[in-house]
Image: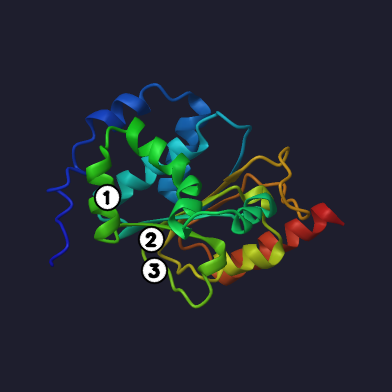
């Protein structure tokens, strides 16, 4: 089966996205533009401030304009969530709750469930966790890393080393939350595309992280 054309699934129709964008405050618009214009964008803000919505809106815009080929939504699995493995239910039932923020954002942007399912089937959207990233290469992708306050250094390195220089990556979270024993205080760090390679950015970020926890 051939992949659906992006115009067919109406990614080019940005009426709802524009309606939502016009309601964004200055900080949200700055975040939207940073995701568009930089390799990395790091955002820390409390729950309910629209981090996921802005991230998804910006990535959909990049996808519609062929800047990226797919959106990869990575949910950082917390220690609390891992306790669900001992509860009854299928793997799908246990993982569905992880994607709720993404589905809510798509609904707000005017994408019905059927459209989202088409995008998932055609792998233009990939929903995953950090636990299955090993051995995966992400090229020309829009990467949204959720709940990054729960990341440790190794998880950061795992995510970053999956990504090529032609990716757009946003990492979002709230350092006031603490679901894991290792907590990352996110940095507002914007790296211009083409200024240096992913590896140099990784070293800079890890160095900043180590300075913060020392």
Which quadrant of the structure image shows residue 126?
A: bottom left
Query: Which numbered disc, 2 or 1, marks the residue that appears first in the sequence?
Result: 1
Q: Which residue is mark 3?
A: 139
- Characterize the local packing of mark 3: few (<14), some (14-19) or many (20 or more) Cα atoms within 10 angstroms: some
Q: How is the image coloured?
A: rainbow
Q: Indicate the secondary structure of the residue bearing disc 1.
A: helix
Camera-nearest label, 2 or 1: 1
Which quadrant of the structure image shows residue 22?
A: top left
Name the quadrant of the C terminus. Answer: bottom right
Residue 203: horizontal and vertical position, in percent?
Answer: 67, 67
Q: CA distance from mark 3 to mark 1?
A: 22 Å
Q: CA distance from mark 2 to mark 1?
A: 18 Å
Q: Which residue is mark 1?
A: 117
Q: How many marks?
A: 3
Q: Which residue is mark 2?
A: 141
- Characterize the local packing of mark 1: few (<14), some (14-19) or many (20 or more) Cα atoms within 10 angstroms: few
Asked whether, in this view, residue 145 is left or right of residue 175, the answer is left
Q: Indicate the secondary structure of the residue bearing disc 3.
A: loop
Q: Nearer the viewer, residue 37 or 108?
A: 108
Asked whether, in this view, residue 157 is left or right of residue 210, the answer is left
Camera-nearest label, 3 or 1: 1
Q: Is residue 197 visible?
A: no
Name the quadrant of the N terminus. Answer: bottom left
Asked whether, in this view, residue 20 is left or right of residue 175, the answer is left
Q: Is residue 152 visible?
A: yes
In the orientation shown, which residue stands out farthest toward the front?
88
Q: CA distance from mark 3 to mark 2?
A: 5 Å
Q: Residue at x 25, y 55 (%)?
A: 66
């Amino acid at each position: 089966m051939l992949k659906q054309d992006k115009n067919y699934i109406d990614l080019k129709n940005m009426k709802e996205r524009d309606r939502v964008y016009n309601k964004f405050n200055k900080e949200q618009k700055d975040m939207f533009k940073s995701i568009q214009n930089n390799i990395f964008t790091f955002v820390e803000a409390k729950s309910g401030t629209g981090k996921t919505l802005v991230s998804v809106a910006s990535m959909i815009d990049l996808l519609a304009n062929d800047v990226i080929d797919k959106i990869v939504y990575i949910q950082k699995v917390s220690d609390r969530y891992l306790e669900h493995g001992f509860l009854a239910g299928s793997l799908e039932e246990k993982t569905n709750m992880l994607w709720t923020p993404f589905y809510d954002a798509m609904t707000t942007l005017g994408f019905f469930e059927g459209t989202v399912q088409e995008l998932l089937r055609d792998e233009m959207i990939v929903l995953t966790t950090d636990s299955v990233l090993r051995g995966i290469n992400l090229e020309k992708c829009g990467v949204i890393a959720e709940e990054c306050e729960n990341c440790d250094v190794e998880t950061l390195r795992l995510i970053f080393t999956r990504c090529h220089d032609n990716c757009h990556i946003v990492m979002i979270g709230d350092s006031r939350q603490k679901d894991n024993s290792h907590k990352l205080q996110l940095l507002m760090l914007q790296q211009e595309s083409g200024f240096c390679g992913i590896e140099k950015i990784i070293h800079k970020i890890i160095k900043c992280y180590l300075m913060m926890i020392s």
